[in-house]
Every structure is written in structure tokens, then in C-alpha cells.
Image (spheres, rainbow, N blue to C red):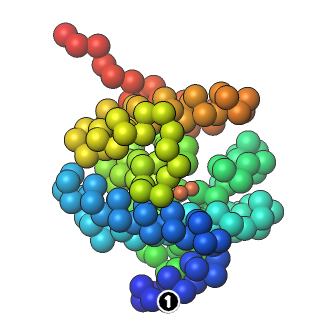
């Protein structure tokens, strides 16, 4: 699908703020891809589409993701569901065939153990894009994101953990697996 058509569809599917966020993630993902030797076009495309399902009702997200294998915990959470639904819509509505791009969309909210470089870039770009409301540690995270992907993943996952805790919610098992995976290894 042509870029203009994608933008047109996205603008209709998202509210203004979410659309601006999307463009911020696209630019940030592209910049990070350049730094870490990842494919810039794939990063930009995944960034552009990562939240394409974010503004729909939960019931529609669940419907959109019905072939994707979602667990009960996800079905009750827009925060979790929009990533899986987004992957499905990216494929079915936006015509994305690239598995690497689709999986970067799929894992952008929970993370997981053994993430690909592109998955890490989208997960992180989502947190640090320029339109993000400032949160404690954002500046440190931003600089880590340009120097040390795994270190940045660790820091970002700790922040998500805190965020989920303060909301009194349960951490999804995939995020727990990611946390364990990116825990810094003791030296020696
Ligand atoms: Fe998202
Ligand atoms: Fe996002």
C-alpha cells in the first residue's frame, strides 16, 4: 500500500494525539535503526502502524485478532489487545507481509524474551518518541536507546513494571519473561 493511502487510513482510524504519537514513533524508530544497523524502512513502517488498532473498542480488537491466539488476560485489556489486533490489521488492512514488521507490532506492548533487534527498537521508540509526556527516567532512557539496546530494554521494562504496579494491575507473563531476559548478567 502506498504511504499516502496508509496515512489517510491511519488518520481516520486514530485520534489526533495518537496520530502524532505514531509519526513520532516512526521517526524515532528510523533514527534508532540507523544507529543500530537495522533496516530503516522496516523500522519506519512498524513505527507508523504499531498503534493502528489503538482507538477501536475492545470488542473490535478481540474480533480483529481472533486468529492470532490471544489469552484471557489480553481479551480484557485494551492496552494488551491493541498490539495483537494491530498486527492483524497491519496485515489485512494495510497489506503488510513482512513478518519482521508484523512481529515488531505484535510485541510492542508486552515485550518478550529473545526479542529481535527490530522488536526492541519499536518497543523503545514507542516509549521515547518526542511527543511522549515526560516521566521520571525518560532522559536517561533516551540516551540509552541510542547506545545500548539491551540496557535500554532493561530500563524500559523496569519502568513498565513500576507503571503496572502503581496502577494495581497484573504484569502479563510475556513482560515478566522479558524482564528476566534483559536483567543484566553479573560480571565475571
Ligand atoms: Fe501501543
Ligand atoms: Fe504507541
Q: Is residue 1 above or below residue 64?
A: below
Extreme residue toward the top, this view: 188
Residue under the point 25% across and 46% down: 146
Could you say whether the residue bearing mark 1 is in a helix, strand or loop?
helix
Q: Is residue 170 above or below residue 115?
A: above
Report the image quarter containing ligand 1: bottom right
According to the picture, the residue beneath numbered tag 1 turns out to be 5
Which of 142 and 110 lies nearest the eye of the viewer? 142
Rendering coords of residue 75 (x, y %): 75, 51
Rendering coords of residue 179 (x, y %): 47, 29
Q: How many marks?
A: 1
Rendering coords of residue 169 (x, y %): 72, 33
Check disc 1: other Cα within 10 Å, few if <14, some if 14-19, many if 20+.
few
Give the quadrant of the N terminus.
Answer: bottom left
Rendering quarter of residue 101: bottom left
Residue under the point 59% across and 66% down: 17
Q: Is residue 67 above or below residue 107?
A: below
Residue under the point 77% across and 60% down: 58
Say whether residue 185 is left or right of residue 165: left
Say whether residue 143 is left or right of residue 96: left
Amino acid at each position: 500500500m502506498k504511504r499516502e493511502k496508509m496515512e489517510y487510513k491511519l488518520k481516520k482510524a486514530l485520534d489526533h494525539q495518537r496520530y502524532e504519537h505514531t509519526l513520532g514513533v516512526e521517526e524515532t524508530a528510523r533514527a534508532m535503526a540507523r544507529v543500530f544497523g537495522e533496516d530503516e524502512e522496516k523500522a519506519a513502517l512498524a513505527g507508523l502502524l504499531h498503534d493502528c488498532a489503538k482507538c477501536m473498542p475492545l470488542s473490535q480488537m478481540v474480533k480483529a485478532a481472533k486468529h492470532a491466539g490471544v489469552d484471557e488476560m489480553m481479551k480484557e485489556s485494551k492496552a494488551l489487545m491493541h498490539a495483537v489486533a494491530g498486527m492483524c490489521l497491519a496485515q489485512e488492512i494495510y497489506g503488510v507481509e513482512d513478518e519482521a514488521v508484523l512481529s515488531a507490532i505484535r510485541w510492542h506492548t508486552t515485550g518478550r524474551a529473545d526479542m529481535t533487534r527490530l522488536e526492541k527498537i519499536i518497543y523503545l521508540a514507542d516509549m521515547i518518541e518526542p511527543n511522549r509526556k515526560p516521566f521520571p527516567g525518560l532522559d536517561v532512557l533516551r540516551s540509552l536507546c541510542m547506545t545500548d539496546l539491551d540496557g535500554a530494554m532493561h530500563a524500559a521494562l523496569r519502568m513498565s513494571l513500576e507503571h503496572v504496579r502503581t496502577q494495581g494491575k497484573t504484569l502479563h507473563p510475556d513482560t515478566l519473561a522479558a524482564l528476566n531476559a534483559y536483567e543484566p548478567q553479573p560480571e565475571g
